[in-house]
Image: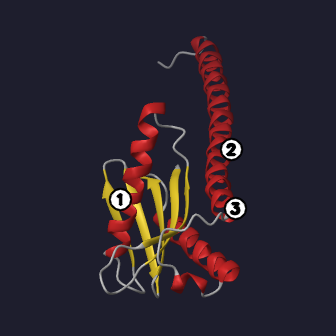
Amino acid sequence: MKITALLVLKVTPEGSDPVILANACDVSHFGYFQRSSVREFIVFVGRTVAKRTPSGQRQSVQHEEYKVHAYNRNGLCALGFMDDHYPVRSSFSLLDKVIDEYQKNFGESWRTAQADGSQPWPYLNEALTKFQHKTIDSVLARGEKLDSLVEKSSDLSAASQMFYKQAKKTNQCCTIL
């Protein structure tokens, strides 16, 4: 369950290209020479999906093992590039939080943006790492619980085998005619 990128875009109904207001990418799991291409791909797909997401709508687009989730709220569109295993409901909840935080921090200033912004917004990077680590921690905790269950299971298996052998020895002296 990995989040690769989060974007906030301004979408205009006239059909012009969406304007990127904020962008955070974690491409560390790609090869060094692939990273710039992956960033370009994220921007291209982000613009395309944002342009095709109607106002007030949510949608998910599948591409190989990744899903692009988009939520357009009155022209302010949040996009998340997640792997296929990331829960859809959690994705849209995260995108809703991103839009709320953006409007809280920048108000309606996004409506006047004409070009891609290089405005730093630390919340997006924090959200990218925060929700990613949460999922990794929950998987690790779940894995640890599974390990303890497997240990208990093997203990139970050994105990039941010992009981079976003991019962077999005990029943050897008694024969049913």
The front one of 138 and 49 is 49
Label 1 near label 3: C-beta < 8 Å? no
Please state which of residues 148 and 169 is positioned toward the viewer in this rendering: 148
User: Of the residues under marks 2 and 3, which one precedes in the sequence?
Assistant: 3
Residue 35 picture location, percent across and down: 46, 40
The residue indicated by pointer 2 is 141
In whole angstroms, how far apart are the C-alphas of marks 2 and 3?
28 Å
Q: Nearer the viewer, residue 92 or 50?
A: 50
Disc 1 marks a residue whose amino acid type is Phe
Using the image, tell me which numbered label, if any, was put on residue 122.
3
Secondary structure state at the residue bearing disc 2: helix
Image height of 62 relative to 76, above or below: above
| Earlier residue among tags 3 and 1 | 1
Instruction: State how many labels appear.
Output: 3
Among the 4 quarters of the image, the one containing residue 58: bottom left
Left or right, residue 74 beside residue 99? left
- Relative height, residue 7 to residue 177 (above, below): below
Q: Amino acid at mark 3?
A: Pro
Q: Residues within 10 Å of mark 1 (few under 14, many from 20)?
A: few
Q: Nearer the viewer, mark 2 or mark 3?
A: 3
Q: What's the residue at 40%, 51% (across, down)?
A: 40
Residue at 41% x, 36% y is 34
The label on residue 44 is 1
